[in-house]
Amino acid sequence: MALLKAWSKLSLNLLVFAVTFSGAPGITWIEPPDPVTTLGGTLVVKCITDCDQPLLIGLETQLDKLPENNGTRWRAFRLKNITQDSLLLCFANCNDKGQMLHSTNVTVIQPPEHVKLELPPRWILVGQNFTLRCQVWGGKPRQNLTLALLRGSQELSRQTVSEQDPRKVAEVTFTATARIEDHGVNFSCRAELDLQPQRLGLYQKSSAPMELHTFGLGTPRLTSPKLLEVGKEENVSCEIDELFPVKNAQIHLSLGGRSLSSSVTRSQDMLRATAIAAIEEGDREGQWELTCIVTLGDQNREVQENLTIYSFPLPTLVISEPNVSEGTLVNVTCEARTGAKVYINGTLQSPGKIAQLSLKATEEYDGSWITCQAVLEVLGEQLWRNKSLKLLVQYGPRLEEAHCPGNWTWPEGTLQTLRCEARGNPAPSVACVREKDRMSLPLGVPLKVSRALGGPYRCTATSRRGRAAKYVTVTVETSPGDSVLVIVGALLVAGFAVTAGTIAALCLRQSTRRDSYEVQMLPLRGRQAD
Ligand SMILES: *[C@@H]1O[C@H](CO)[C@@H](O)[C@H](O)[C@H]1NC(C)=O
Ligand SMILES: *[C@@H]1O[C@H](CO)[C@@H](O)[C@H](O)[C@H]1NC(C)=O
Ligand SMILES: *[C@@H]1O[C@H](CO)[C@@H](O)[C@H](O)[C@H]1NC(C)=O
Ligand SMILES: *[C@@H]1O[C@H](CO)[C@@H](O)[C@H](O)[C@H]1NC(C)=O
Ligand SMILES: *[C@@H]1O[C@H](CO)[C@@H](O)[C@H](O)[C@H]1NC(C)=O
Ligand SMILES: *[C@@H]1O[C@H](CO)[C@@H](O)[C@H](O)[C@H]1NC(C)=O
Ligand SMILES: *[C@@H]1O[C@H](CO)[C@@H](O)[C@H](O)[C@H]1NC(C)=O
Ligand SMILES: *[C@@H]1O[C@H](CO)[C@@H](O)[C@H](O)[C@H]1NC(C)=O
Ligand SMILES: *[C@@H]1O[C@H](CO)[C@@H](O)[C@H](O)[C@H]1NC(C)=O
Ligand SMILES: *[C@@H]1O[C@H](CO)[C@@H](O)[C@H](O)[C@H]1NC(C)=O
Ligand SMILES: *[C@@H]1O[C@H](CO)[C@@H](O)[C@H](O)[C@H]1NC(C)=O
Ligand SMILES: *[C@@H]1O[C@H](CO)[C@@H](O)[C@H](O)[C@H]1NC(C)=O
């Protein structure tokens, strides 16, 4: 509308020549080419032509104009009180080229009115690219309008706007890579209308600062046993690194949907939760999901693992009678949970969960342990449970040569101990009595051997389960005389090779019993050696 009004005011003089405008091109121009002014400002413009002898140079505008100066090929005009954008039309009437026209708009500066920065609404993962959108309302001339992205007070980048219509919102986008150090930093956008070269000033407008949130979030890892027994406790933990900012992160562990109370440790870029997973008696066996969730801002990372919950109590071992008389038939039964295999004393009795064994109680079994082993395979792993019971077998006294030797030969005058022990359950008592005079020989105590001790004895073992008897003969050797001491020389005669310096003596003693000699090597000390 403003433009139409401007054209309607143009003089008739111009319209006459306008017919030739397109047909006879010459060069006419305006200086400055894109005039800019402040509101209500004054501007001097020059209409210039290249034609040699122009008849007339003029300026058509709705603005108040005053001739300023002139030359052969130019005229300058002063335009005053410029309050709105206006069209300037310069014309030159030439003899040879006809009329030449040139138009331009004078722009009244409008500082940028409003600037808005839009950040991504979410937290941005460190290392990822994101875009920031900056919008500006108003601001002209648009050619001189730039938008700068600022991080705090530091300018990161700057772009000119492409939208040239000052009535429309101009928008630019910036791309940046999220960094740890950008977290919590205020970003802003600043519109700048820079007309300092024209000495018309610098007009700036900034957006409200917007805080950027960046984060780092690795993948959490779970540490836990694969198997968990009912009634037992196990440590489970979850750890995440490459985490930023650690203080804003939350970590949460749950098992089978139940939250685990965990203790959380934080370090520079790591977060760890440790908890005790306890499965109570009566809880369901099978797969339980262990879940770890790490939350940071509006982000979260989750990891899950299945724990196999099983129950495997000790097998039930029953001995029909754990304390029996010799010869009794004893039944041993062992039972484990379904799915387990049962062994009695290392032997698989039957492939099922119950094992049975019948055995005849003999004295060898007295005091022996019967062991039941149950084995359960869970996730390819063999789990064992053992239970043992002792079997007691009652049997009568046994007097055996090994523990009660029948022949004893003792040299007279020595200290000797008679041993005669009986086996049996309950433990029998043993007594040895000489038949001729009913003299009893004390057992297990040292005795000074005299001829009077000799003779046959009757040893009797007695317990609640009966008695056993055995003859034991004691022979007393009488000594013939003193031992003969023979010096080293005799040793050499006997054909022994003794190295120099060996000091020894040979002691020969005649045995009373046999025609034999015992040879003893005795070390000699001090005066004896001489
Ligand atoms: C050109 O300028 C001179 C002096 O400034 C003035 O006298 C003259 O009238 C001007 N010519 C036109 C055509 O305005
Ligand atoms: C400038 O122009 C405006 C309207 O275009 C007018 O209201 C105002 O009075 C003028 N000022 C002067 C100083 O001429
Ligand atoms: C002057 O401005 C008007 C409207 O803003 C536009 O249509 C025209 O093309 C402009 N003229 C020049 C020479 O820039
Ligand atoms: C982020 O942008 C830079 C250049 O601006 C580019 O080199 C890089 O590949 C981009 N990264 C991603 C993850 O898109
Ligand atoms: C303003 O825009 C004009 C036209 O594009 C240009 O010639 C001038 O250099 C610009 N000024 C600044 C300060 O950018
Ligand atoms: C960011 O801007 C807000 C709003 O102006 C201000 O409250 C906050 O302190 C600024 N933060 C920083 C780190 O400058
Ligand atoms: C769990 O970890 C703590 C500390 O490392 C340790 O003392 C405890 O014995 C563990 N408990 C189990 C059930 O493994
Ligand atoms: C855990 O087990 C359930 C059911 O057996 C299965 O659907 C799920 O995929 C398993 N999860 C993992 C992490 O193995
Ligand atoms: C075994 O049985 C016998 C007789 O029945 C009894 O005297 C003994 O005390 C029992 N032993 C045990 C350990 O019960
Ligand atoms: C042991 O088992 C056999 C057959 O399995 C049975 O006849 C006997 O009565 C059982 N004995 C005891 C003491 O349970
Ligand atoms: C079972 O084994 C133990 C030790 O190996 C042994 O002492 C016991 O006699 C065995 N019992 C049976 C019933 O085989
Ligand atoms: C004891 O010795 C005598 C004679 O040396 C022998 O006849 C007898 O069989 C032996 N008795 C035993 C129980 O060894």
Image (spheres, grey):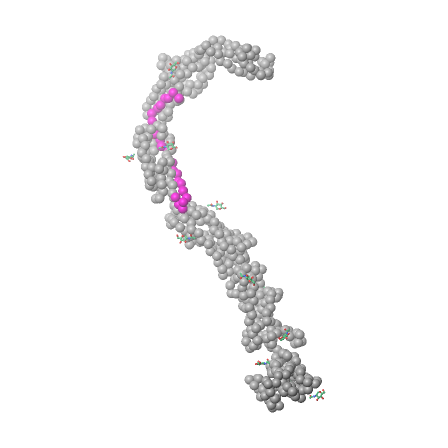
What is the x, y in percent for residue 464?
Answer: 33, 25
Count up the numbered dots.
0
Is residue 31 in view?
yes
- State the residue at coordinates (60%, 75%): 143
Q: Is residue 21 left or right of residue 330?
A: right
Identify whether 209 is placed above or below 317.
below
Image spot of residue 209 (x, y percent)? 57, 67
User: Which residue sits at x=56%, y=60%?
Assistant: 179
Residue at image position (39%, 45%) is: 378
Which portion, as a residue range, is magenta?
377-402
Q: Is residue 356 left or right of residue 265?
A: left
Image coordinates for residue 145, horizontal then vertical, percent: 60, 73
The one of 134 and 273 positioned closer to us in this rendering: 134
The quadrant of the rendering that contains the N terminus is bottom right
Name which quarter of the figure residue 78 lies in: bottom right
* Along the viewing direction, whichever of 154 and 47 lies nearer the viewer: 47
Q: Quadrant of residue 354?
A: top left
Q: Is residue 220 magenta?
A: no
| Residue that sits furthest to the front in the current view | 96
The quadrant of the picture occupied by the C terminus is: top right
Q: Residue at x 64, y 82 (%)?
A: 27
Compared to residue 462, the image places residue 110 above or below, namely below
Residue 50, how many percent across, how many down?
A: 67, 83
Residue 38 visible: no
Q: Check residue 381 for magenta coloring.
A: yes
Q: Is residue 465 above or below residue 287?
A: above
**Main secondary structure of the magenta stretch:** strand
Q: Residue farthest to the top?
A: 481
- Left/right placement of residue 358 relative to residue 527 reads left
Q: Is residue 57 left or right of residue 469?
A: right
